[in-house]
Amino acid sequence: MIPQLRPAEVKTARDAASADAPIVLLDVRELPELALSSLPGVTHIPMGAIPRRIDELDPDAAVVVMCHHGVRSMRVALFLKQQGFSDVSNLRGGIDAWSLELDPSVPRY
């Protein structure tokens, strides 16, 4: 089971994270989507590139996967869990929920 976190939960966890135990916010959207709306400090690897770029991620780090609405990110989160990542969650509702629930300055598309 992959935990689904609301935007406020992710923000609180990121704010409380330390340099020794960071929380990786993994954005799996495509580059054109990032041009429309993005969050600072994310790690960007498009969904289709995850299998060949998985070595760029630390399997022991806390990883929160995000996309536009949370569907693609859930698929990636499940894949990462199957690959042995120990602490993976999904941003429920994606960047759209982030804008609606937490920060309306983040553009919606």
Image: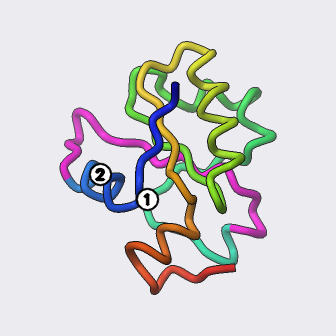
Q: Which residue is mark 2?
A: 14
- Amino acid type of disc 2? Arg
Residue 61: quadrant of the picture: top left
- Tell me the SS state at disc 1: loop
Q: Which residue is most to the bottom?
A: 105
The label number, if any, that marks residue 41 in the structure image: 1
Q: Position of residue 21 (x, y in %)?
A: 26, 34
- Tell me the SS state at disc 2: helix
Q: Position of residue 5 (x, y in %)?
A: 42, 48
Along the line of sight, the residue nearer the viewer: 15 or 103: 103
Horizontal placement of 87 versus 65: left or right? left
Determine whether 81 is above or below 101 in the image. Answer: above
Of the numbered discs 1 and 2, the one sitting upstream in the chain is 2
Asked which colour scheme the image uses, the reply is rainbow
Q: Residue at x 74, y 43 (%)?
A: 47
Q: Quadrant of the C terminus?
A: bottom right
Q: Residue at x 47, y 48 (%)?
A: 25
Q: Is 19 one of the magenta-colored residues?
A: yes
Which of the two marks, 1 or 2, is nearer to us in this view? Answer: 2
Horizontal placement of 12 versus 50: left or right? left
Question: Which residues are drawn in magenta?
Answer: 16-33
**Are there few (<14), some (14-19), or many (20+) residues within 10 Å of tag 1?**
few
Kindly check if marks 1 and 2 are in contact, taking CB atoms under 8 A apart as contact: yes
Q: Is 108 one of the magenta-colored residues?
A: no
Along the line of sight, the residue nearer the viewer: 83 or 69: 69
